[in-house]
Image (cartoon, rainbow, N blue to C red):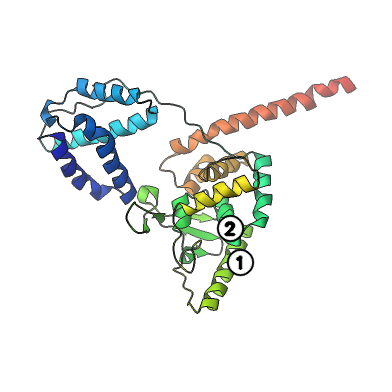
Amino acid sequence: MKITEFCSVWLTVKKRSLSPTTEQSYADALQRVILPFFGDMEIEKITSLDVEMFIAALYGQNLASETIRRYLAIFRSMMSKAVALGLIDGNPAAHGKIESIRREERFFDVLDEMGLLRLLAALDSVELRWKVYVLFALDTGARRGECVGLQWKDIQGREVWIRRSGYKLTGKPKATKDPKGRRSRKVYVAARTAELLGALRREQKKNCLKVGKSWKDSFFVFGDFGEMLHPSSPTSWFDKFLKRHNLPKIRLHDLRHTSATQLLLHGVDLRTVSGRLGHADLEVTQRYLHFMADADKDAAEKVELFLYQNKKMV
């Protein structure tokens, strides 16, 4: 059997455990990267050397190590299923059979205290919906899809349940899926965030009344007349907002990173931060700890000032 034939079999079986967006990303990886290299090969004739050449070809395209690791993981999963089905005796892409791909340190931007203050000040001049969206994202660290998929029935006072994530696949209508990791989570928001959510709810009810539409608690919090926002709309709005107010250029997703680092800097423990963000384990959350080291370095500079510099005054 050729890899071309086996791909469709594998994806049909694998899709049962995948979210729609992950299934789409796997299908894209197969068509754009894996099949052009392995497609005409017989599955039982693929060797670890072939896999090494595949990796070398990806490096030759100047792809990031994490991207290559992702493509390799997809191919390794395919070969693992082929072994389980008895099509091949061993996985040519198995760990230990090929050279490991080094991990690159992942960097992301967060707003410092001054940048955060400037952003918050600029929010006073925007539409209520977007003001609440940004503050909710900073408060909870929720992902874009989770914010888009939030419904009013998920909110009771300061208690918010993250139960779904909005997404849009090419050529298909907007839809929702389970949050990442397929686990719902409960977070508490600041009292002021809850007040602003209440104000947004009243505004939406008022707008519905104007057009003769009944308001329902199943309406999406940040949508128009109950409809879910297009998942790319917040990103588009945020980019324009930053440019218009001459604010530091960051990604919308960096609001999530900013939320996590601010919580840690203000003494919230790692496990609580991990739970608020919906991380699968603490290891993911630990990547924020280098910001704590930076803060500690700044603290040492302040110690220098009050402990030693004042000697000159004695």
Q: Mark 1 points at which residue?
A: 199
Q: What residue type is labelled 2?
A: Val
Q: Name the residue under label 2.
A: 132
Residue 81 rendering spot, x and y as whole percentages = 18, 37
Residue 227 rendering spot, x and y as whole percentages = 44, 65
Depth check: give the residue in front, 242 or 182.
Answer: 242
Q: Which residue lies furthest to the right in this view?
A: 314
CB atoms of marks 2 and 1 within 8 Å? yes
As helix, strand or loop, the secondary structure at mark 2 comes to helix
- Observer able to see residue 35: yes
Q: Is residue 206 left or right of residue 309?
A: left
When the figure is inspected, residue 10 is found, relative to residue 302, above or below; the finding is: below
Residue 64 rendering spot, x and y as whole percentages = 40, 28
Q: Quadrant of the C terminus?
A: top right
Q: In this view, does 264 lie to the left or right of 34?
A: right
When the figure is inspected, residue 109 is found, relative to residue 50, above or below; the finding is: below
Q: Which residue is drawn at 64% across and 29% down?
A: 296
Q: Which amino acid does label 1 sit on?
A: Ala
When the figure is inspected, residue 77 is found, relative to residue 153, above or below; the finding is: above
Q: Give the distance between the C-alpha atoms of the residues marked 2 and 1, in whole angstroms.
A: 9 Å
Identify the mark nearer the N-term, 2 or 1.
2
When the figure is inspected, residue 114 is found, relative to residue 168, above or below; the finding is: above
Residue 169 rendering spot, x and y as whole percentages = 34, 52
As helix, strand or loop, the secondary structure at mark 1 comes to helix
